[in-house]
Amino acid sequence: MTKEEKLLELDFGSMGQINKPSLFGSFRQKNHIRPVSGEWELKDNQLQTLYDEDTFDSTESIVLFGSGKWTDYTCAGNFTFMTQSMHTDEGGIILYFRYKNTKNHYSYHFCYSTKRIELWKRFKSQWSMVGEGVPYSFQLQHLYLFSFSCEGDNHICHMDREPVFQCTDADIHEGCAGVAAKYCSAGFRDISVSRRIT
């Protein structure tokens, strides 16, 4: 019999407020949240990043969470495009998994401008697309329900409970998860990570 074990649950509405310079304050350690780049705030029960091309020192705002030893897991939650991408050919919401470091990870890219979902891999510093990207039309201020799973070398992504992407790749076996926004403002809420146990 297969059961599901929760590895992490992030309810941003119950975490209180965060203020600079103590970004993420006391719950940073407790929930294994690591802001990597950009500026983040808790607002309207969401973890939000508000992109400003003139003041940001990075094109991408990234938050990582969980353990670098995670192998097979499912990450689910909600995201919202708060603005369009500032660039017509790239930018959007990014969901990281099996994130070892900046040179080794997988990432789903949800591009508002090109209306596509793509899975990218950075392995030994080299970028490559995994499988074929799929068309998907996004709307501003719509609360999307996402989930993605990595089980062995199988990867699958769901949007609003419908499967949209599935492929195989075996290069990266473990790593934490994360969310990001590139060239746009975005909000994330109710993120959970779980794994199947037998």
Image: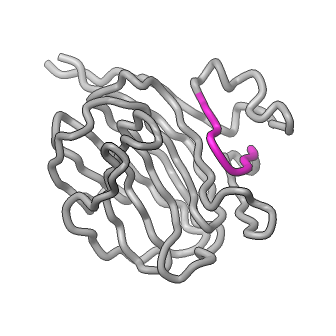
Give the answer, above or below, for where 72 lies relative to 84: above
Q: Residue 95: x percent and y percent?
A: 44, 50
User: Is residue 36 magenta-colored?
Assistant: yes
Q: Report the side of 137 relative to 13 (left or right).
A: left
Point 17% across, 34% down: residue: 152
Q: Residue 187: x percent and y percent?
A: 63, 55
Q: Nearer the viewer, residue 117 or 103?
A: 103
Q: Report the side of 91 relative to 136 (left or right).
A: right
Our reading of the magenta stretch's main secondary structure is: strand
* Quadrant into which the N terminus falls: top left
Q: Nearer the viewer, residue 31 or 146?
A: 31
User: Is residue 24 magenta-colored?
Assistant: no
- Which residue sits furthest bottom? 88
Q: Quadrant of residue 163?
A: bottom left
Q: Quadrant of residue 110?
A: bottom left
Q: Report the side of 22 relative to 177 (left or right).
A: right
Q: Residue 15: x percent and y percent?
A: 72, 31
Point 31% across, 51% down: residue: 121
Q: Residue 72: x percent and y percent?
A: 26, 30
Give the answer, above or below, for where 33 lies relative to 150: above
Report how many numbered discs are placed on residues in the image.
0
Q: Nearer the viewer, residue 85 or 48?
A: 85
Q: Nearer the viewer, residue 151 or 190?
A: 151
Point 49% across, 41% down: residue: 178
Give the answer, above or below, for where 35 lies relative to 25: below
Which region is colored magenta?
33-42
